Image: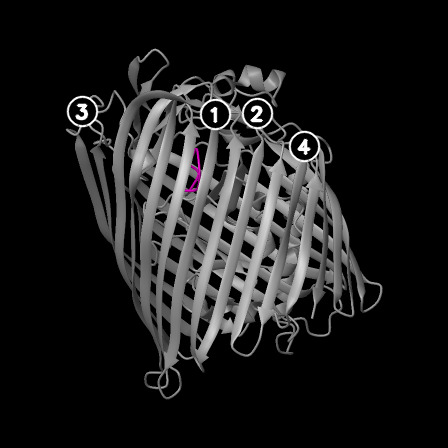
Amino acid sequence: MKTNIFICILVLFLSVLCISDVYSQEEPIDSNYTTEEIIITGTRTLKKIIDIPFSVERIAQRDITKVTGIGINFMFQTIPGIFTQSRYGNHDVRISIRGFGSRSNTGIRGVRILQDDIPESEPDGQTRIECIDFNALGAIEIVKGNASSLYTNAPGGVVNFKSDLYFTKPFVSLHNEFGSYGLRQNGFKVGVINEDLRFLLTYSYRNYDGYREHSQEYQNITNSVIETYLSRGTKLSVLLNSAIGTIKLPGSLNKANYNSDPNTANPTDLSRDSKRISRKGRLGIRFNTLFGKYNENEIEVTGYGALKDFDRTARTYRIFARYGIGGGFRYINRMDIANFSNEFSVGSDVYYQTGPITEYQNINGTKGDQLLAQTDETISNVGFYFQDQFSIIQNKLDVLVTGRYDNVLFDQKDMLLGVKSANRGFDKFTPKIALNYKFTQGIAAFTSYGLGFDTPAGNELDNYPFSSDNGDGLLNPDLNPQTSNNFEVGIKANVPTGQRNFLKSTYVELTFYNLSINNEIIPFVVDNTVFYRNAAKTNRTGAEFGLKTEIVKGLTLRSAYTYNDFKYKDYVARIIDANGIITDTKYEDNIVPSVPKHNISVDLMYEYNFSQHVRAFIKGNYHYIDKMYVNDANTENAEAYYLLNSMLGIDISYKGISLLAHAGINNILDKKYVAFININDANNRYYEAGPESNFFGTFNIGYTF
């Protein structure tokens, strides 16, 4: 821990040095530094980062290509406030922002996931990211903190994966990745551009044996975007993605099995051949136009349809067929009022998804002949929002007011017996107000207060035998949405460079927040089946600190520190052991599981230009995760750990030909650690190990016409 304290002190010292230098320089902001100019769309407005009264981040493409690993968890390591747990690689990553999302034992919850501004999240908020291909990305936008006033089921924030659409010349490229545990990923990327359109097509095939027994993965991913310009200020976009694949699930281990052999599979999951087979695709169409004397008005209309087929083997063999249709509309007006800037927008979203869920016997991973159950599940969401950001003091003080009304409906019918049906509906209006004060063009303070709203997902409403209706109904009658009161205050600074030759291009952000959550939705596990319940009240207090700087020419530092103090209040939990014995236990003042109190990550990268055609880089990463409790009772915990990762690479471009090659090692010291926590398991199977020391490499070649 002394090493971690030293790193924190070093990072804080650098940030204080940078900020203090702001007041000793008279020169304007370094024009070479562009963070303040970055435009974010995930906030449903076009604003520079420095003008947004939230904590936001943007990961550029050049940073995506230099990630020290293959999973999305590596993308977010140096983003303060985000904590990821990778279960079996990239397929089932838990993304948590300020604790929202930590409850999910499968998929992503509490954080809205978008791909090119179209929801990857389902109408109930649950998300899996099979369709996200990193080779197709041009940027990743992250809005941290409560976004319920803008999006359905987004109390933790928004992650928007943006396609690499804004290239300047036609190109074609091949990408190849390889590594330990049989990793092979190959594919291609094509970009076409002329005066009237842009076209991007990517395809990737992934084969991964996995580092644990029974954890193989196979994926075919396709992404395509066509953007055509109908006239000046008017464009039409067609967006397509699909994913077909299989992932084997090794399951979680108890502490004894984890300590003896962390890479073995859970015997129950192995005997059941637990796996997920996915076939999914989505087609979206978007129309966008600007009009008015100064193009101060904008209308955007989006429609999309999705087809999803899933096979899931666990206790039974379940087949899901889901057919979804959705869309969105928004109107934006950007017009000064009495010489004060004002941007007003209104919009709506709708998403309707339906389809049968069929359940058979699971005979060692194959579908049995006996039909056990068949239900028709429909989930729909309708939401309306408004947003207005206006200046009180021009170029100094802005106020942002947002509000959203959501209505989420669940309906299930028993198609086998034809007598059971159930429906539940949840609705709420969630307002938010935020202030942004700019001391200079590069330094701003912000604060916000808003209400959050998060409904249960469809699978979270699964009923269980010990609910208030003894499990007779199709939907759990006891589970309610969680609501939250969210407050944050922070400062962002693009630090002037002046005449310095060190600590250039520096960006610093510090945020404090306090959240009070009512009816927090908590998972518990019985016989490897996850159910959910409400905790009465939870309090979360935290701080996030991020620093990005060029220490000297070519040497850059990126660091993130997150502090979390999350505790239950007024929580009486019903515990069901493996024998079905029920006890009620008080958990007041217990620490929320699966959230580290301290999370530190530091990247140090050196780039060197041998010539205008050849650039090389070397990068190291240090990542520390504090201990985490694995259950609400706080009787066991996953130990703290730190990882060292590294990579080096070379980038060559000459007469249209480009070559990118890099290789790296993760977990250099071969640390044993818990990468994913299966919260509140009734059989004490909480632990899923991360990979041992492993290598990876990339070889990409392309041609620009």
Q: How is the image coloured?
A: one colour
Q: Label 2: state its secondary structure.
A: loop
Locate residue 382: give its quadrant.
Answer: bottom left
Amino acid of disc 2: His
Counting residues from the start of the chain, the first of labels 2 and 4 encountered is 4
Q: Quadrant of the C terminus?
A: bottom right
First-in-chain label (1 vs 2): 2
Residue 623 visible from this viewpoint:
yes
The secondary structure type at the circle numbered 3 is: loop
| Residue type of the residue flagged with mark 3 | Asp
Q: Is residue 73 left or right of residue 360?
A: right
CB atoms of marks 1 and 2 within 8 Å = yes
The magenta segment: 101-110
CA gap, disc 1 and disc 3: 30 Å
Main SS of the magenta part reads loop
Q: Residue at x 46, y 28 (%)?
A: 678
Which of discs 3 and 4 lies nearer the camera? The answer is 4
The disc, 4 or 1, on the residue closer to the chain's N-terminal end is 4
Direction from residue 275 to residue 474 in the image, left or right: left
- The residue that mark 1 highlights is 274
Q: Residue at x 35, y 39 (%)?
A: 321
The residue labelled by disc 4 is 181
The image shows residue 619 at horizontal and vertical percentages of 73, 50
Mark 3 highlights which residue? 469
Residue type highlighted by circle 4: Tyr
- The residues tagged by marks 2 and 4 sit, at their Cα atoms, a distance apart of 12 Å
Name the N-terminal-most of marks 1 and 3.
1
